[in-house]
Image (spheres, rainbow, N blue to C red):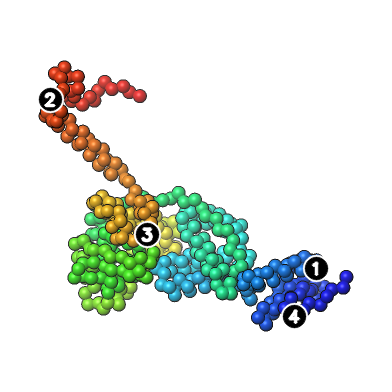
Amino acid sequence: MTRRKARWGEGSVYRPNPRSSVYWWKLSVGCVPLRGSTGKRTYQEALQFLKEKKREHLQGTLSHNTEKVTISDVVEAYLRNAKLNDKPSYQDLEGAWRLHLQKEFGHLKAAQLSTDHIERYQQKRRAAGAKPATINRAVQVLRAAYYLGADATPPKVLRVPKFPMLEEKNTRKGFVEVPEYLAFVEQCSKVGAGMLGAFETGYTWGWRREEVAQLRVGQLDMFNRCARLNANETKNDDGRVAYMTEALYQALVPLVVGKSKQEFVFTREDGSHMVDFRKTWWEVCVAVDPVANRMFCRVCKAPTINASKCANPDCGSDNVGYRGRLYHDLRRTAVRNMVRNGIPEKVAMLISGHKSANVFRRYHIVVETDLEQAAMRMGAGLKKEVARVRGGGEGSENRSNSGKNSLPEALPSEGLPVH
């Protein structure tokens, strides 16, 4: 069969050398020649592959380098975008990539990623003991990077694979009760004024850890005792105003004295910024309740009280793990405390920074003490009603002396049927 020579702009398929069994494609886009392997062994199949490439070119989705782009390129572009936009969660995103995702996916081409790769990664992390929520947060970094890469010009990826998510059953329900609150205040005071202020802020306003760490002196109005965050300074891009309680005001005063408006509120004793105070929080929690909270070496499994180093001198690893109360538990506590004290839901959402009412209500989890108080209130209401009826309240004159509608002298507690 005689093959017509392709005209300029039509593209062509060819074998790169006489011994090659696979056809390659070539197409000029903007005077720049693009080429690559079709993976096809017959001429007709290679032509069909070229037609797909030409259709992508007409749709504007054909990139000059999609076949060479790696997953590292895609994720690093996403991280640059997050840092450029001052995302409060940038540290967590970068940590998820550097500690977990990079060694699993960094060497792959972006076009190679499939659902099977994701599921194998999930199985490996589950076998290592990671929680479903932790694994999902890491996979979400990869998914967000792919969507940003597909939206770029020219696109870094032409296809976004399906990213399956694990079912999360480890919803936390931790609350800080008043006795524990007092213990935290005492222990945080020993650590430093910065840690005490961070604790009081989380306990009172329920702000996210990243928002607390990035708070600057200029955002505090100490005269009116409030904080004002602009729309671009919060996770959900909504402005926020929150007023201080007396305890919070007293905790923040030492942190703003002598500082300029651009300086961070929460700093350590040496003046350094408390960018990430999770390890300090772990040590505080272990000191408050070493039974419910514990730190351990992930290498030799030995318990430790130092969040930076294993206590075992024969090990000395800095890979320390933690199980116990999280700083995020203060967010749940603040929401519950506001609802308990009669603050309207809309106002409480403005203080805590919840954008969705459904998410806010999920944080307001009913605990056993609330159920106990409900029973006590119902019992008190019944006693009040009984006293009103016995005391000759409204309508008592219409009751006959036969005791037909009268109540017994005491509520029955015996003789009831047992089921």
Residue named by callout 3: 355
Sooner in the amino-acid sequence: mark 1 or mark 4: 4
In percent of the image, x 39 and y 64: which residue is there?
Answer: 236
**Which residue lies most toward the right here?**
1
Q: How many marks?
A: 4
In percent of the image, x 55 and y 66: which residue is there?
Answer: 146
Labelled pair 3, 2 in contact (Cβ < 8 Å): no
Residue named by callout 2: 397
Q: Secondary structure at mark 1?
A: helix
Disc 3 versus disc 2: distance between alpha carbons?
55 Å
Q: Residues within 10 Å of mark 2 (few under 14, many from 20)?
A: few
Sooner in the amino-acid sequence: mark 1 or mark 2: 1
Disc 1 versus disc 2: distance between alpha carbons?
104 Å
Look at discs 1 and 4 and give the one toward the viewer. 4
**Which residue lies most toward the top here?**
402
Sooner in the amino-acid sequence: mark 3 or mark 2: 3
Look at discs 4 and 3 and give the one toward the viewer. 4
* Residue 273 vs residue 263, the one in the foreground: 263
Any part of residue 286 in sight: no
Labelled pair 4, 3 in contact (Cβ < 8 Å): no
Q: Secondary structure at mark 2?
A: helix
Circle 1: residue type: Tyr
Sooner in the amino-acid sequence: mark 3 or mark 1: 1
